[in-house]
Image (cartoon, rainbow, N blue to C red):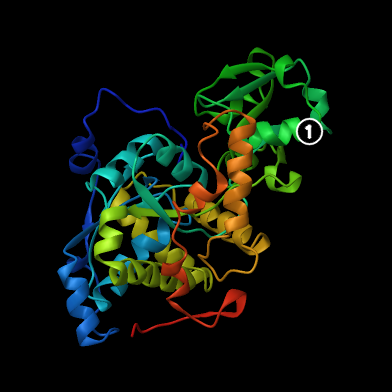
Amino acid sequence: MPHPGLIRTTLAAVALTTVLTGCGADSAADTSAGSAGSAISAKRCAENKDAGTITYLSGYQYQSSVSILEYVAAAKLGYFKDLCLNVVLKPGTGDTAQNTKLLASGQATVGPVAEQDVIQARANGIDLTGISSYSNAGLEVLMTNKDITKLTQLDGKVVGHKGYVPATVRAMLVKAGVKWDSLKLVKQGYDPSVLPRRQNGLAALTGFVSNEPNQLKTAGHPVTVWKPVDYGVPSSLGAMAVNTAFAKAHPHAVEDILRAALHAYDYCDADEAHIAECVGYAAELSGPTYDKKLNTTIWKTETSYVKDHPTPGQPLGGIDPKNVAGIVDMLHQFEVVPGSVTVERAEGWFDTSYVKDIYAGAGVGGKLVWPAP
C-alpha cells in the first residue's frame, strides 16, 4: 500500500480535473452528524458559510494516517458542520506533485503537504501556503535486514526505492558516513517483501515508518528501521497546506478547518474504542477491501511518533520556523532547490497564525479553543 506523498512524479496522462471527479468515494459535510452552527457564533458562522464549498484532498486515499483520518472523522462526527463549514472530502492518489497543483489552482482547498514539498512547490512557482504540522520528524525511513548493524555496511550495496531516495534518507546516510556514490540505487515496486527475500541483492529499502515495517512484522519478517530523525535530519509529519487565495479571503474558515481537525484528532486518539470508530469511518468511505487492522496500526504508529517527537515550543499543529530553515539547508545541500530559495523567503511560504489563533495560551501548554468564538 502506498503512503501519502509516496509518488511525487506528475501523472501526465491524467488531467488534473480527473483527480477530483473520478477517484473513489466522496463525503460532503451535509451527510455527517452534527448541528450546523452549534459550536460557533452567529457572526463567524455567516463568515464560514460565505467561504462556500471547501474541498479537502487527502494525501493517499482514506488511509488512516494523521492528516487524513482526523479530517474524515471531523466530517463524520459533524465537527465541520458545527462550525458552519461545508467541507467535501476527496481521496488523493498519493501523487504529491499533483496535489500541490490542485491546491494552487483552487480545485482543492486544503490538504496534507509536507513542509519540504511546500518549499519545492513554491520554488517551482506553485502557489500554496503551509499552515500546520504535527512534528519535525518525518515518516520516511530506511529498512534493512537484521544483519546490517551500522549504516556504513551499506557501502557498495543495493538500495531500493519507490522512484527516488527521499532527501531525508539521503541526508541520514551521508551523516552516518555512508559513501553515497558507492550505492547501487534501484527502483522497486510497492511490495516490501523484496527486502527479506534480498531480491537481486537488495540490502536496504526506503519506506514509511508506519507502513512497510508493520507489514513486514505482521508477515513474520521484522526489519531494522533507520529513522532520519535519530540523526537530526529535519522533516515534517501531518503537515497541511491551503490554497493561498482562499486563505487570504477566508482566514477564519482556515482557522476553523484546523480547529475541527484537531478536535477530531483528540477524539480519535482518546482510546481504543475511538480509534476503532474513526478507522471505521475511513473504511466506510473506502469499501470492503479496506484493511482495518493495518490502518489501525498506521494510526497508532503515527500518533505515537507525534507524541515521541513533538514540535518544539509549539502546540499540536504548530509550525517550527527553525525546522523550515533546516529543511531549506538540506535541500540546498542536495541541490534540490536553487540558491534563490533563501531561509527568509521559504519562511514566508508558511503562515503560523492560523494555529496560534485557535489556541488559548501560547506554546506547548496552549489549549485548543472549542467551541469557536
Q: Position of residue 214 (x, y in %)?
A: 60, 44
204, 297: nearer the viewer:
204
Q: Residue at x 36, y 71 (%)?
A: 260
Q: Is residue 354 above or below residue 193?
A: below
77, 324: nearer the viewer:
324
Q: Is residue 234 above or below residue 72?
A: above
Q: Residue at x 44, y 56 (%)?
A: 67
Residue 15 falls left or right of residue 96: left
Residue 90 falls left or right of residue 4: left
233, 80: nearer the viewer:
233
* Quadrant, the C terminus: bottom left
Q: Residue at x 18, y 42 (%)?
A: 21
Q: Position of residue 140 (x, y in %)?
A: 59, 41
Q: Residue at x 66, y 31 (%)?
A: 170
State whether residue 89 appears in this view: yes
Say which residue label 1 marks.
146
Disc 1 marks a residue whose amino acid type is Lys
347, 129: nearer the viewer:
347
Q: Position of residue 172 (x, y in %)?
A: 71, 36
State whether residue 147 appears in this view: no
Crowdedness near tag 1: few (<14), some (14–19) or many (≥20) residues, C-alpha within 10 Å? few
Q: How many marks?
A: 1
Q: Quadrant of residue 251?
A: bottom left
Q: Position of residue 277 (x, y in %)?
A: 41, 67
Q: Is residue 55 above or below residue 174?
A: below
Q: Quadrant of residue 39?
A: bottom left
Please, what secondary structure does the residue beneath circle 1 have?
loop
